[in-house]
């Protein structure tokens, strides 16, 4: 045997029974398992295997014959050094022979077609690469059973007993010795190999009848060969053919020959958009999206690249409506969506990225993750600060206090050094000096120094106020946004989110937020833009895209705000049915896309183009110049009305206090 370095045998008999040797040695000597070519072929077939299980499937009718073949098989195996751990299992069929006969009468049989293919010989490294692209399992199963129909019955009763791992390597040994069973044996083997492919997605499998019929023929089913209007062909090869070219008993998953794969992809911006942005329509990179059925975005382009690289046709199955994810309910059932299609095996690939989390289900598997996303909360943007408050926002609280202190101190100082001791005149004069109101006065030297300081104070303060007013008129400002979960909790905003399906509410704060959770809506952003009385969760990149490209006001300012504190970071991946034969080769191609930077480029190109397209549309609608409106000048009117009101109030106070005489003299 080739490539043999050590021996590790562990014989474990499960559900075992005593082995009876009732057949003659002469009959067993005719089995091909006595030849070196037999073991050399299976040594290469189980090239990746480090744990080989010999599984004996028994029925009462042929129990002794199968046991005798198994005993001789193990005896011969002991002559060869296999570098694997061996395990022996024995299972019994619960049905009676009468049930078996009835099943045979109703078993469908396909017409067998053997159409030779020209396959170039390969070396060991190429064989190893083919094996690795079609399997990620290190386990192999050598199934010994009397005939094809018995194996069908075992599959009917408990398929997981026969096929514990779909991507493992299998070899079927039908050990019947009755010549009458050779009639139409090719069709029966074709039937069982098709069933392994169609129902269980097993591609690493060969079959043989070592003791009867063509004992040196090995059968393999090729699912990606098209014959007339159907797909799949079963071929058989002699030992000599296989020894000369080991490629002929492999199923390379590198060219699907335009095989139609059932796939679901739905609208999910910006990762799966049904139309290419206008800015990219002239780019040769995105000139054709037929392979992805017209979908752009990182999910659509990954699907298209898989289709082109592996040469398969995309057959869209299911709805293409927005966010057609589907989810698992607590009772184990599924809501309508892509996940349900995968679990029911209606599709082989869901092309929309989703969080790589534990769904507590053995019916799906994830592809290699292609990106990572933060899940954050989107809240309504804080209200704009009214323009009329611009005067009060020139300085912060500390600044206004210092200005007030300076004014009071200056008034007191001028009271002592000024020309008069009348409080009203002192106050007005100081106010005039500090704020640049003309006042006739010939100061002394000490007064000159003080008034010079007041002049510099006037230049600085009024300049700052004027600059702040200009900034206020030209810049829109908002009140502080919500940026922590604590602030979100205090805001009493409801939370529209399925996030609790993926994270634990293990803190009092998260428990409070969970109590405020409401039913998730597919048009959540639109509802949030209208009602502004709740919040929602989304991936950070998706939220940024929606905000920048759709939910902005006429001036280009966002309608929503992303809370700085996020729930968690999730890896994004696609899903396939459990045990899918395509997972390994899909992962291989997706990994190449990630390592080459294609996924990042696709995402950046699509997102940037859609945002620019939206901003351009807004710019065309917006006037380049516009006059100040009454809204812009409302601050000035508020101040003048405040002055009028204060003057009237003081005037009425003076009349009431008797300080104003009837002839107008004070």
Image (cartoon, rainbow, N blue to C red):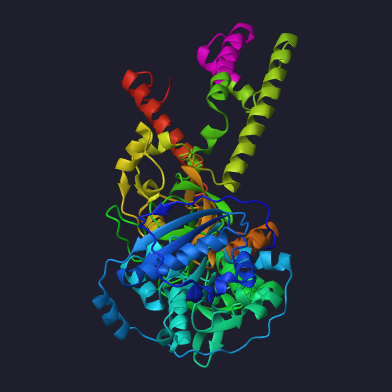
Q: Pick whichever, 396 or 16, lies toward us.
A: 16
Q: Can residue 624 be seen here?
A: no
Q: Quadrant of the C terminus?
A: top left
Where in the figure is residue 464, as x and y percent of width and height?
64, 32
Image side of residue 87 versus residue 34, left or right: left
- Give the residue drawn at x 57%, y 10%: 412
Where in the figure is residue 100, as x and y percent of width and height?
29, 77
405 is within the stretch colored magenta:
yes
Q: Pick whichever, 94 or 466, lies toward us.
A: 94
Majority secondary structure of the magenta segment?
helix
- Give the residue drawn at x 47%, y 77%: 193
Q: Quadrant of the N terminus?
A: bottom right
Question: Residue 80 sits in which quadrant?
Answer: bottom right
Q: Pick whichever, 551 or 110, lies toward us.
A: 110
Asked if 252 appears above or below 432 in the picture, the reply is: below
Asked if 439 appears above or below 503 in the picture, the reply is: above
Question: Residue 592 sits in which quadrant?
Answer: bottom right
Where in the figure is residue 99, as x and y percent of width and height?
25, 76
The number of numbered badges drawn on the structure is 0
Q: Specify start and end residues of the magenta stretch as a single range.
A: 404-430
401 is within the stretch colored magenta:
no
Q: Pick whichever, 382 or 318, lies toward us.
A: 318
- Give the residue drawn at x 63%, y 78%: 239
Where in the figure is residue 182, as x and y percent of width and height?
45, 86
């Amino acid at each position: 045997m080739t490539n043999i370095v050590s021996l590790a045998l562990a014989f474990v008999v499960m559900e075992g029974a005593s082995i009876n040797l009732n057949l003659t040695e002469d009959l067993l000597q005719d089995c091909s398992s006595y030849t070196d070519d037999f073991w050399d072929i299976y040594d290469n077939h189980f090239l990746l295997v480090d744990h080989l299980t010999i599984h004996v499937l028994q029925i009462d009718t042929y129990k002794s014959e199968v046991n005798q073949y198994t005993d001789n098989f193990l005896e011969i195996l002991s002559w060869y050094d296999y570098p694997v751990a061996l395990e022996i299992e024995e299972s019994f069929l619960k049905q009676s022979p009468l049930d078996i006969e009835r099943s045979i009468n109703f078993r469908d049989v396909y017409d067998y077609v053997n159409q030779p293919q020209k396959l170039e010989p390969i070396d060991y490294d190429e064989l190893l690469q083919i094996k690795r692209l079609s399997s990620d399992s290190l386990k192999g199963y050598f199934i010994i059973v009397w005939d094809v129909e018995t194996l069908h019955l075992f599959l009917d009763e408990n398929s997981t007993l026969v096929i514990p791992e779909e991507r493992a390597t299998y070899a079927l040994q039908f050990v019947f010795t009755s010549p009458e069973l050779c009639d139409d044996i090719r069709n029966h083997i074709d039937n069982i190999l098709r069933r392994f492919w169609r129902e269980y997605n097993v591609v690493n499998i060969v079959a043989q009848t070592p003791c009867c019929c063509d004992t040196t023929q090995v059968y393999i089913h090729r699912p990606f060969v098209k014959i007339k209007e159907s797909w799949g062909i079963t071929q058989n090869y002699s030992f000599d053919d296989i020894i000369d070219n080991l490629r002929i008993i492999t199923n390379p998953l590198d060219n699907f020959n335009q095989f139609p794969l059932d796939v679901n992809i739905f609208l999910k911006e910006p990762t799966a958009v049904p139309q290419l942005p206008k800015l990219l329509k002239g780019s040769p990179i995105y000139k054709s999206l037929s392979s992805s059925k017209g979908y752009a975005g990182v999910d659509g382009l990954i699907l298209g690249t898989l289709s082109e690289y592996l040469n398969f046709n995309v057959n869209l199955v299911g709805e293409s409506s927005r966010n057609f994810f589907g989810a698992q309910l607590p009772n184990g059932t599924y809501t309508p969506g892509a996940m349900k299609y995968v679990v029911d095996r209606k599709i082989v690939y869901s092309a929309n990225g989703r969080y790589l989390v534990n769904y507590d289900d053995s019916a799906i598997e994830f592809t290699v993750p292609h990106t990572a996303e933060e899940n954050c909360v989107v809240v309504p943007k804080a209200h704009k600060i009214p323009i009329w408050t611009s005067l009060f926002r020139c300085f912060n609280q500390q600044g206004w206090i210092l200005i007030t202190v300076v004014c009071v101190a200056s008034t007191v100082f001028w009271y002592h050094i000024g020309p008069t001791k009348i409080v009203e005149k002192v106050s007005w004069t100081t106010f005039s000096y500090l704020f640049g109101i003309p006042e006739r006065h010939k100061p002394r030297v000490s007064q000159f120094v003080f008034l010079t300081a007041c002049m510099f104070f006037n230049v600085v303060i009024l300049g700052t106020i004027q600059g702040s007013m200009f900034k206020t008129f030209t810049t829109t400002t908002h009140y502080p946004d919500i940026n922590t979960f604590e602030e979100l909790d205090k805001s009493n905003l409801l939370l529209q989110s399925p996030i609790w399906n993926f994270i634990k509410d293990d803190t009092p704060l998260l428990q409070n937020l969970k109590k405020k959770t409401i039913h998730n809506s597919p048009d959540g952003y639109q509802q949030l833009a209208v009602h502004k009385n709740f919040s929602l969760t989304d991936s950070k990149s998706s939220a940024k895209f929606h905000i920048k490209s759709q939910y902005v006001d006429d001036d280009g300012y966002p309608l929503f705000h992303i809370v700085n504190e996020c729930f968690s970071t999730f890896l994004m991946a696609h899903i396939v049915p459990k045990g899918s034969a395509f997972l390994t080769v899909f992962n291989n191609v997706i990994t190449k896309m990630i390592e080459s930077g294609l996924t990042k480029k696709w995402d950046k190109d699509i997102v940037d183009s859609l945002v620019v397209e939206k901003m351009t549309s807004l710019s065309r609608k917006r006037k380049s110049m516009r006059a100040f409106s009454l809204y812009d000048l409302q601050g000035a009117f508020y101040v003048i009305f405040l002055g009028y009101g204060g003057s009237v109030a003081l005037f009425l106070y003076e009349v009431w206090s008797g300080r104003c005489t009837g002839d107008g003299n004070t």
